[in-house]
Amino acid sequence: MKIKICGLNITRDVRLCIDLKVDFLGFVFYKKSPRNVNLKDINILSTYNKKNSSFVAVTVDPTDNFIKEYLLGNFEYVQLHGSESNDRVSEIKNMGFKIIKAIKIKEEKDIDKYKEFTNADIILFDTPGMEKSLEFPKNLISKLPQGENYALAGSVSEDNLSNINKLGVNFFDLSSSLENQLGYKDHFKINSFMNKFNEL
């Protein structure tokens, strides 16, 4: 099983998540988001001993210039939430990244869109909310493809982790359920969730 925590603060949350063995640490590059990264903080990332954790840049249609200036050398993964084609996925991948492609799911027919992205390393099934914490349609969870290359975001919490896992999901992406206020991670909640995750 894999875990990704998204919307982290570079100066405040990273050490805790590495110490708790969180697999993927996500940092948001989206100006409209309360979790948007301060670009001045990016160079701090190189000071951390990541151990087995990977850093993920969460983006929306990033330009080549942005990728080269801010992401290259700082992140192993780029997560794409925009209108990228499979060819664009390849272009970014060829710059030296692994790719997480987000697919927004409203109804069952949306699930099949993941088949278009053969060049992505990981597919993230997400709600269409984009920073609005929408609930993932429960009736569709069991219809998602299974395996460690398929992640679920939206409504995952300590309370329903076990039930979602029983539906076949073993890669979980969390953000708002680990906050005590919008854009501010609660370290007690992160600790508690990881304890539950490790029990599973």
Image (spheres, helix red, strand yellow):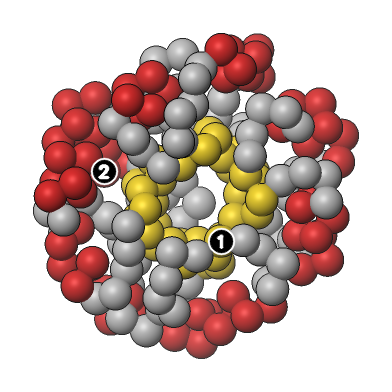
SS under mark 2:
helix
Residue 98 can be seen in this image = yes
The quadrant of the image that shows the N terminus is bottom left
Figure check: 174 above or below 149:
above
User: Tag 2: residue type?
Assistant: Ser
Name the residue furthest front: 51
Q: Residue at x 76, y 52 (%)?
A: 93
Residue 132 disc label: none
Q: Position of residue 145 (x, y in %)?
A: 44, 79
Residue 199 appears left or right of 145: left
Figure check: 200 above or below 19:
below
SS under mark 1:
strand
Residue 107 appears left or right of 74: left
Residue pointed to by mark 1: 122
Q: Mark 1, mark 2: which one is toward the viewer?
A: 1
* Residue in front for this viewpoint, 156 or 105: 156
Examine the image and state in which quarter residue 85 appears: bottom right
How crowded pointer 2 is (Cα within 10 Å; few <14, some 14-19, many 20+) is rated as some
Q: Residue at x 42, y 71 (%)?
A: 147
Residue pointed to by mark 2: 177
Q: Residue at x 69, y 78 (%)?
A: 116
Q: Position of residue 154 (x, y in %)?
A: 36, 57
N-term-proximal mark, 1 vs 2: 1
The quadrant of the image that shows the C terminus is bottom left
Figure check: 189 above or below 58:
above
The span from disc 1 to disc 2 (Cα, nearest Å) is 22 Å
Residue 106 appears left or right of 134: right
Examine the image and state in which quarter residue 17 appears: top left
